[in-house]
């Protein structure tokens, strides 16, 4: 068939598995992890690699060359795009959309319905070469319904509030209150999402 599924994988019904997919990989380092469970109706495209210890809900989709490391909890109706990398110990809620070429580091939380644009990078280490770096690693929290624009960078431990919109190319260096629009480097709040208009006139207020 051109793919490999290890015995520690429980795959739901109606799964579609592409060529060169590998499911249930055990990491070389010593970690505690159980088998991987993937819910019904999954679409796992070619060259995706999913490690052991993942709990993944129904209607899961990956793009091509997607990597998901060990011990993550991923909800229903989640899509992770081509060449995106999800590290270990990540929590992803229902209905989350992660586009292509996105990096999600360990100990990050993506709440229900959030949207991460292509080429975005979340980070988790304030001082990467510090000998005690592992003691203070903390990924960002992207709250329910928040949208992160393409090529954005979210710094360690930052909380992006509910329904926020992070503009393309923004560097988010501090917590963002709910329902705000943030742009720039460093990111700054410029308006409330209720103030956003559709420049094409298709809808009165895209984010009421």
Image: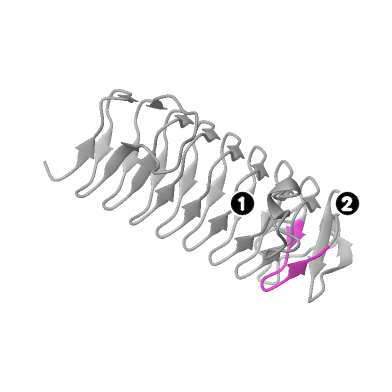
Q: Which of 35 and 11 is in front in this view?
A: 35
Which corner quadrant holds the N terminus?
top left
The residue shown at (19%, 49%) is 19
Q: Does any portion of residue 52 appear in the rendered image?
A: yes
Pointer 2: what residue? 177
Q: Residue at point 43% right, 24% down?
A: 34
Residue 104 image position (x, y, % from top left): 58, 53
As drawn, the residue found furthest toward the bottom would be 185
Question: Which of pointers 2 and 1 lies earlier in the amino acid sequence?
Answer: 1
Report x, y in % for residue 42.
35, 34
Crowd around label 1: few <14 · some 14–19 · many ≥20 (10 Å)? many
Q: Residues within 10 Å of mark 2 (few under 14, many from 20)?
A: some
Way the structure is coloured: one colour
Quadrant hosting residue 107: top right
Q: Quadrant of residue 13?
A: top left
19 displayed left or right of 178: left
In the image, 97 versus 153, the foreground residue is 153
Q: Considering only vertical position in the picture, is 5 above or below 139?
A: above
Residue under the point 74% across and 61% down: 155
Residue 73 picture location, percent across and down: 54, 32
Q: Is residue 151 magenta?
A: no
Mark 1: secondary structure: strand
In the visual, does 183 lie left or right of 73? right
Q: Which mark is residue 115?
A: 1
Give the residue at the far front of this rendering.
131
Write the residue at 53% across / 60% down: 102
Whether residues under marks 2 and 1 lie with C-beta atoms below 8 angstroms apart, the answer is no
Spatial separation of the CA atoms under disc 2 and disc 1? 17 Å
Task: Return the residue nearer the eye: 168 or 125.
Answer: 125
* 61 vs 173: above or below: above
Q: Give the residues drawn in magenta, as a range.
A: 165-173
């Amino acid at each position: 068939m051109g793919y490999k599924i290890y015995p520690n994988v429980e795959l739901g019904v109606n799964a579609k598995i592409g060529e060169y997919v590998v499911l249930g990989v055990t990491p070389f380092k010593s970690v505690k992890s159980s088998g991987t469970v993937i819910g019904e109706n999954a679409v796992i495209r070619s060259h995706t690699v999913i490690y052991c210890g993942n709990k993944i809900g129904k209607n899961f989709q990956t793009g091509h060359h997607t990597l998901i490391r060990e011990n993550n909890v991923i909800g229903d109706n989640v899509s992770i795009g081509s060449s995106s990398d999800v590290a270990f110990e990540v929590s992803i809620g229902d209905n989350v959309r992660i586009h292509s070429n996105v990096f999600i580091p360990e100990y990050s939380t993506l709440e229900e319905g959030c949207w991460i644009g292509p080429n975005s990078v979340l980070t988790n280490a304030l001082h990467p070469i510090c000998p005690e770096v592992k003691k203070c690693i903390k990924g960002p929290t992207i709250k329910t319904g928040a949208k992160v624009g393409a090529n954005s960078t979210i710094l360690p431990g930052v909380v992006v509030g509910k329904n926020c919109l992070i503009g393309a190319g923004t560097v988010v260096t501090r917590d963002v209150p709910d329902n705000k629009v943030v742009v720039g480097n460093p990111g700054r709040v410029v308006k409330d999402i209720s103030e956003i208009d559709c420049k094409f006139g298709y809808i009165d207020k895209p984010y009421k």
